[in-house]
Amino acid sequence: MPKYIVQFAHFHEDFRLAELESLATLEGVEISYDPSTYDTMSPFLVIEVASDELAAKLVRRAILLRRIVEYWGSGTTYDELFAEVKQTPERWADYNQSSFKFTVGGFGKSLTTKEQISVIESFSFLGFEGKIEMRNPDVEFAVLEDYGESATQTNAAAVPKKIWFGRIIASGSRDLVSKYDLKKRKYLGNTSMDAELSLVMANQALARPGALVYDPFVGTGSFLLTCSHFGALSMGSDIDGRQIRGTAGFRRGVDGISANLKQYNLADKVVDTLVFDICRNPWRKGAKFDAIVTDPPYGVRAGAKRLGRKDGTVAENSFRIIDGVENYKRENYYPPTVPYEMAEVITDLLNFAAENLVVGGRLVYWLPTVADEYDPKDIPQHEVFRLVANSEQPFGGWSRRTHESTESTPAPEHAPAHMRFRDRYFSKFEPMASK
């Protein structure tokens, strides 16, 4: 199959391959690459795809894939690169009369205009006779120099570790990160998920037209926006309706989630937002959702809660009639709740997903873990799921990870790194006492 150069954004490196694989599944594009050649310290990866059309499909909604380039050659020096390019002169002839443009970029070093011009002129052997067009050329070529992540931006004498050259096929959709930036959003809260990772998770969930996506801890609705942007019908629920309505003292907005739906013209894609405890949900049993995408509350900014009282008794106050209205029917009523331990949240989430996801559906969720104690065996398990991806976003003493489904493996003998996470966070991750 033809070879292509994927140029990743140099952000969230642990999520890049997961998004690439998810997009390949979503678009029905068969890809092949050598995993040993992938380096989180470099934004370049060579893959094989059957055609330019399929390569373009692969990146058209990508967030962490900047562009895909038809591979013409590579080398540790320009002489090596030119030698490989010259092996396929028949490729040049197709563009001999086309208008064209060269893009020269350096990873790990900013190239001056003079350096870029010098690089472009060194490709004069291609003999293109077409007109140079900077805005709308018939074809665009990319020269990509990789100096490594540790290179010094101002080191003029730096030598690239690798140089890539090829024809640009298509670019990703990184402009969406700016479009859905939290700073531009009318309504948000202190737990709103940032736009970039929300969009990546929508891709990992295979959000698409005709799919029904659900967030059982919807909060301020970040995932509703990104999944619906890609055409999915979405819906969400939360135990605290004040977040949905926008009356919980958040920084902006009085219309809650609906303000954002109007802002982004997505109201017709969001089926509804509901208020209930996921542990006592009203859903009819049976598969109904194509994906569940969520960020369960883990207590750093907002503690997880479920309905109940600490003494386990029924809250009779809820049914007290005041001025002819039962207490629980009042607009400002908030039912009694008890803390919801992180390990229990995840167990209940997996059980819920097992009952409500269609076959082949995806569960994509965040799991906080104590960094020094994390073990891959800590990944929650369920017999009906298999693990698709496990990506980490580090925060120093702790991390959070996105998981896409899980496969059944032996349960860990030690306490998993997400056990009692809220207590561990506020104790600055002191070691747990043995029992």
Image (spheres, rainbow, N blue to C red):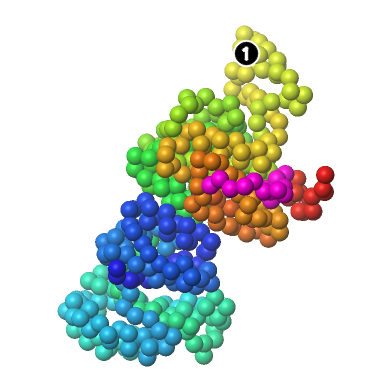
Q: Position of residue 75 (x, y in %)?
A: 40, 84
Q: State yes or no: residue 229 in magenta.
A: no
Residue situated in front as seen by the camera: 326 or 39: 39
**Residue in view at x 36 percent, y 62 percent:** 31
Q: Which residue is mark 1?
A: 326
Position of the C terminus, as image quadrant, is top right
Position of the N terminus, as image quadrant, is bottom left
Q: Is residue 279 above or below residue 125?
A: above
Q: Is residue 254 above or below residue 295?
A: above
Q: Mark yes or no: residue 59 visible.
A: yes
Q: Quadrant of residue 139?
A: bottom left
Q: What type of secondary structure mainly makes up the magenta span?
A: loop
Q: Quadrant of residue 22?
A: bottom left
**Label 1 SS:** strand
Q: Position of residue 123 (x, y in %)?
A: 30, 87
Residue situated in front as seen by the camera: 83 or 428: 83
Q: How many discs appear?
A: 1
Residue, far top:
324
Q: Label 1 sits on what residue type?
A: Glu
Left or right: 348 as drawn, with respect to 8: right
Q: Which residues are magenta?
A: 404-422
Residue situated in front as seen by the camera: 434 or 244: 434
Q: Is residue 420 above or below residue 322?
A: below
Q: Position of residue 177 (x, y in %)?
A: 46, 56
Q: Position of residue 289 (x, y in %)?
A: 43, 36
